Amino acid sequence: RNLGSDYEEVQKRTLTSWTNAKLSTIGDQISNIETDLKDGKRLLKLLSVVSGQPAPKPERMNMRIHQLANVAQALEFLQKLVRPDILPDIGNEAIVNGD
């Protein structure tokens, strides 16, 4: 292993731990930061907890089309909370695909 991959693993564990600390306030948790947020449902919950504002309701089904819709809602919700110019240019497909 090299220093870069070790650093990446530390970052993943740290972000997973932080996310679980926030989600635990509503009785939820994740086990893998790379896969557990990509359907958009927990991402919406996380944004709601962090912002203190109710997030849009996610789509109930879990097909790709619903995942894309949920992540799009999460990104729109996030854009309303912060200045759009400071957000990275990321699309809902990149998150659903795990990129």
Image (cartoon, rainbow, N blue to C red):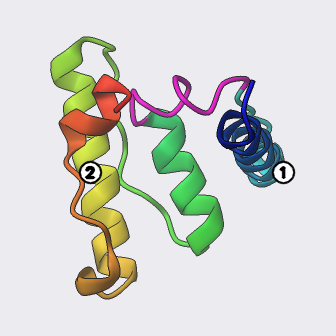
Q: CA distance from mark 2 to mark 1?
A: 23 Å
Q: Is residue 76 magenta?
A: no
Mark 2 neighbour density, 10 Å: few (under 14) some (14–19) many (20 or more): many
Q: Residue at x 67, y 34 (%)?
A: 5
Residue 10: x %, y % from top left: 79, 43
Q: Residue furthest top?
A: 63
Residue that lies at the very extreme toward the front in this rendered image: 2
Answer with mark 2 or mark 1, whichever residue precedes in sequence.
1
Q: Which residue is mark 2?
A: 73
Dominant secondary structure of the residues highlighted in magenta in the image: loop
Q: Which residues are magenta?
A: 31-40
Q: Quadrant of residue 29?
A: top right
Look at the numbered disc 1 and give the secondary structure of its residue. helix
- Is 38 situated left or right of 51 in this image? left
Q: Amino acid at mark 2?
A: Gln
Which residue does the image show at 74% across and 41% down from the upper left? 3
Q: Which residue is mark 1?
A: 21
Q: Is residue 55 rendered to the left or right of residue 12?
A: left
Q: Quick check: is 32 in the magenta stretch?
A: yes
For marks 2 and 1, give the one nearer the viewer: 1
Mark 1, other Cα within 10 Å: few <14 / some 14–19 / many ≥20: some
Residue occupying the point 37% across, 44% down: 57
Side of 15 where 41 appears, left or right: left
